[in-house]
Amino acid sequence: MKKLVLATVLTIAGAGAALADPVFGTWKTIPDDNGNSGLIEVAACGSKICGTLVKSFGPDGKEINSPNTGKKIIWDMQADGDGKYSGGKVWSPDRDKTYKSRLELKGSSLAVKGCILGICRDGGTWSRVN
């Protein structure tokens, strides 16, 4: 009986890991208009993908206290396949603007692009931290 319970637990744990999207993890942003950057933790939010600012860094690269820590930066993103994501929004704290966005995952790089009222902005290429 103990072996059956252990086998069931291991099967369920393995299935959960198989469902993890390759974009899940922590990403370092490029510096914003103020020279600040951050770490964004990307994870599942129900059936969608979200990203939360977990750490902020000043222009000198030192960690800073930011009122934006803990806030959603990415939400409602959906996987389209082949490392492409769309349908979601990305909030840019430095401009306090929310962009309809697309993400593209290539290895340990994540290209971020977004548009608002027909004006598009390149959010840069973020680097995977873990």
Image (cartoon, rainbow, N blue to C red):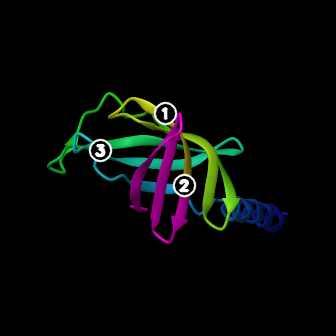
Characterize the local packing of mark 3: few (<14), some (14-19) or many (20 or more) Cα atoms within 10 angstroms: some
Magenta span? 104-130
Location of the N terminus by quadrant is bottom right
Characterize the local packing of mark 1: few (<14), some (14-19) or many (20 or more) Cα atoms within 10 angstroms: some
Name the disc covering residue 32, or none: 3
- Residue nearer the viewer, 127 or 124: 124
Find numbered disc 2 in the image and state the secondary structure of the residue it sits on.
strand
- Tell me which numbered mark, 3 or 2, is placed earlier along the sequence: 3
Secondary structure mainly formed by the magenta segment: strand
**Residue visible at 43% across and 31% down?**
97
Q: Does residue 129 appear to the left or right of 113 in the view shown? A: left
Name the disc covering residue 98, or none: 1
- Residue nearer the viewer, 16 or 76: 76
Residue 127 in picture, x, y percent from top left: 39, 62
Alpha carbon separation for disc pair 1 and 3: 14 Å
Characterize the local packing of mark 2: few (<14), some (14-19) or many (20 or more) Cα atoms within 10 angstroms: many
Give, as a three-letter code, the residue at label 1.
Thr
Alpha carbon separation for disc pair 2 and 1: 15 Å
In which quarter of the view is residue 32 placed? top left
Q: Label 2: which residue?
A: 103
Give, as a three-letter code, the residue at label 2.
Leu
Residue occupying the far bottom of the picture: 107
In the picture shown, does residue 57 fall above or below 21?
A: above
In which quarter of the view is residue 55 placed? top left
**Residue visible at 44% across and 55% down?**
26
- Tell me which numbered mark, 1 or 3, is placed earlier along the sequence: 3
Circles 1 and 3: CB atoms closer than 8 Å: no
Residue 37 in picture, x, y percent from top left: 29, 47
Find numbered disc 3 in the image and state the secondary structure of the residue it sits on.
loop
Q: Does residue 85 appear to the left or right of 61 in the view shown? A: right
Q: Does residue 87 appear to the left or right of 111 in the view shown? A: right
In the picture shown, does residue 58 fall above or below 97?
A: below
